[in-house]
Amino acid sequence: MKAAIRHLKRNRGRTILTLLAVLIPVYFLVFMFGFSNSIVSDMFETATRIDTGHFQVRHIERRGMGSAIPLMQDSESVLAALDEIDGVEWRTVRLDMPALASAADRSQTIYIQGVVPEEIAPISSIGDLVVEGTYLRNGQNGAVIGEELADLLNVGVGDEMALLCAHPETGLGVLKVPVVGIYQAPISAMGRTIIHTTLTTARQLARSPAATAVVVRVDDVEGPWDVGKIEAVTAQLTGSLPDELEVLDWRELAPQVSGYMRILQPAMIIFAAVFFGLGALVVLNTLYLSVMERTRELGLIISLGASRWRVIRMILTEAGLIAVIGAVYGALIGVALVWIVEAFGGIPLPGADLADYMKVVGMSPVLHMMISWPQVVVSAVTMVGVAILAAWFPAYRASKLEPVEAMRYVE
Amino acid sequence: MSNNALIQTIDLHKTYKTEAIETPALNGVDFTLHEREFTAVAGPSGSGKSTLLHLLGGLDRPTSGEIFLNGAAMSSLSKDQLSRLRLTRIGFVFQAYNLIPVLTVLENTAFVMELQGVVRRERIRRARAILTELGIEQYADQFPNRISGGEQQRVAVARAVVTEPSIVLADEPTANLDSKTSHELIGLMRRLNEDKGATFLFATHDRRLHDQVSRLLTLEDGRITQDQCR
């Protein structure tokens, strides 16, 4: 080890180059993963907070329902079962249904979410997005609609609109509700279609005391990488559910979001592989040069009786040492940069168009970064492994030197 | 083979081959080396001295013929076995570039013991002892580039004898040294031969050193032409 350190010190230029070959991919990946984690987390939060929760319990029968969700009559027993399970952060009953909203001569197809206002706050962020009027109170007859729908129907806070619902199980229902609040949607499509009413109002409209889902959030879930925590809760619940009910997790409820994440993950892996590959090439090249320069020294060592494995180990020790130092510094620099970016409040996207687009797809117009320690460790450890693997070829060549020829070698 | 024969060569040939040319280096070398001998192989450049030492040290293989070390044929040994043989039975002193530049004198001296797996405390103790014996303990913590060529060769001798090998092979150990230092180095080797019973075989083309050896083999055109005991 001491000799390896001295060898690395002896040729500082090459050592620094090798160090950078390991350091740069690690720091860059930690930084990039910081971005992608934040994007994924943003999408996940948008999908799970506004609409799906981490999972829902629904009625299993969906045939002939079209875009409507089947009604479940006994949501209370599900709530009771959830209250017995560890790891449930929050749960609430919701009655969702497609409907038509009309005001004067204008109408728009919408999707009603009938909610319990005091329970929904931790699950849905719509309450926080209200920019005009107020959010719902328990039992209140009213609706909170998006800015886009308000524009389409030309209604404001205090105006009435007619809701027309035709659920396959309960038939036609009509109700007049006042607009009590207008929210600013992170996604414009959501602002056009999603409205909140109280569960009481939704039940009046559906003419049924039923619900369509029990929506659940799980403790300590920060992103899709915490899926294990969600599965742990659903696994506990599944056994206690009656046959006609099923658990649907956010991936099934928001397939477009999970689909995007499925694309992002291999893209990041390819990205990482390219960086690891480039790093490995530099490591291989510099160590090969080092072996060439030390041909006589290696010849001497082999002459004195060092086994081939010993020579291989010697070169790999040097590679491993530099790889560990490079990977640790790379990880530290990456983490530090992420912290610095976050300390300054993230990176605002340049140009109003791009910021607007991000908002339309449900994401923040400011790019934030998020450290995932397992990713930091995996990036660093993988780079160390790749560097040692890349060092194998020069190490093998060194071990195959013929001692007499090697000692005659002239640089 | 006589009872105390350490090395015996039988009809040893070595020919270096390139695509176009075959260059014979040894043309039938037969000799026996006994334990505790202090022998020089003399001869002009190109006579095959280095080749002979390389073959005896298991660094290269003969084209034909056989070498016996303590009665065991070396030709049957694999590369790994030859490597093990060099590590445990043979000490080397080369003409130049003898020391590992990133190791101190003490570490260089202890290096072969490290390869042998001797525990650190023991190898440091033995390395210090031999450096003291050879009068170079003051350089123990120096790197090779900070000491003279003669001192470097002394360290190489220390490293060669510290493991108490069956034989020390030295290939032109004085080639890069001045006359006085050469005499001192050979004198040192001779002392180790007499005091410790170490067997030395070294190649030299320096006639001034011939009177310091107990046996002189003269090699010409790849053959032993003279074998003088003194």
Image: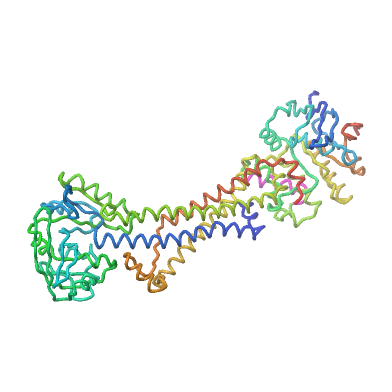
Left/right placement of residue A284 relative to residue B169 reads: left
Q: Give the answer, above or below, for where A160 lies relative to B1.
A: below
Q: Residue at x 79, y 37 (%)?
A: B18
Does B63 lie within the magenta span? no
Q: Nearer the viewer, residue A399 or B148?
A: A399
Does B126 lie within the magenta span? yes
Where's residue A29, x and y in %? 47, 59
- Magenta stretch: dominant secondary structure: helix
Residue A392 in view (yes/no): yes
Q: Residue at x 21, y 54 (%)?
A: A56
Q: Nearer the viewer, residue B175 or A269?
A: A269
Q: Nearer the viewer, residue B16 or A162?
A: A162
**Segment colored magenta:** B121-136
Left/right placement of residue A106 relative to residue B66 reads: left
Q: Give the answer, above or below, for where B206 lies relative to A341.
A: above
Q: Give the answer, above or below, for where B38 lies relative to A315.
A: above
Residue A213 in view (yes/no): no
Q: Nearer the viewer, residue A182 or A276?
A: A182
Where's residue A10, x and y in %? 67, 57
Where's residue A220, x and y in %? 29, 58
Q: Residue at x 92, y 44 (%)?
A: B208
Query: Which quadrant of the structure image shows residue A243?
Result: top left
Where's residue A325, x and y in %? 54, 57
| Coloring basis for residues | rainbow
State the count of labels: 0
